[in-house]
Image: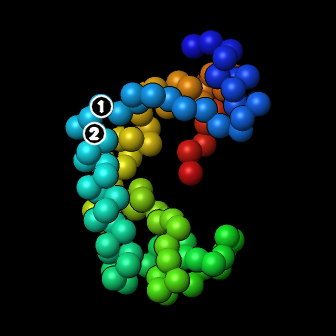
Amino acid sequence: MTDDLKSTLASQGFIILPNVLNPTEFSSLRTACSTIRSLASSGQWPHLRTLPKQFPPWSSDPSNGIWGIRHLLYLDIPYQSLFAASYFNDTIINTVKHLLDCEEEDLIME
């Protein structure tokens, strides 16, 4: 891993990691996200972030729009293991360790 990532993060505020997920993983996550969004829109998953507020507390009424879904790692959410596998992907973890100059035991993933 190069310091290019660090300089890109410093200058642009974000980095892009191409091909972290293979096409099958990406497709599975798209399906999972669509399902969870449908659950949130229908009131079956109450942990959402709604418009027009950027910060909590958020309304549980999705009629103005949903800009985020929370608690994707809860054990009772469908696709939890799929979300966890993507979240703790080795490429992502190694990139974060590089960017923060730390070891895995220093990370607290929330």
Label 1 residue SS: loop
Q: At which x and y percent is residue 37?
A: 36, 68
- x then y, percent, for residue 82: 30, 48
Which residue is at a point 37% across and 83% down the rendered structure image?
43
| Residue situated in front as seen by the camera: 38 or 47 | 38
Look at label 2 and name its amino acid.
Glu
Callout 2 touching callout 1 (CB < 8 Å): yes
Q: Note whether 90 is above or below 52 in the view shown.
A: above
* View extreme (top): residue: 2
Q: Which mark is residue 25?
A: 2
Q: Is residue 104 visible?
A: no
Q: Residues within 10 Å of mark 1 (few under 14, many from 20)?
A: few
Decide: is 43 above or below 88: below
Secondary structure at numbered mark 2: helix
Quadrant, the N terminus: top right
- Asked if residue 50 lies left or right of residue 73, the reply is right
Q: Nearer the viewer, residue 100 or 37?
A: 37
| Residue count near mark 2 (Cα–Cα under 10 Å), binned few <14, some 14–19, many ≥20 | some
Which label sits on residue 107? Answer: none
**Residue 44 percent coordinates (x, y):** 33, 80
Most foreground residue, 24 or 56: 24
Q: Residue furthest right?
A: 11
Between 100 and 8, the one nearer to me in the picture: 8
Residue 2: x, y in percent?
62, 12
Determine the residue positioned at 34% across, 58% down.
33
**Side of 75 relative to 11 (left or right):** left
Q: Amino acid at mark 1?
A: Asn
Q: Is residue 89 visible?
A: yes
Q: In this figure, what is the number of numbered marks?
A: 2
What residue sits right under mark 1 in the picture?
22
Q: Residue at x 61, y 32 (%)?
A: 15
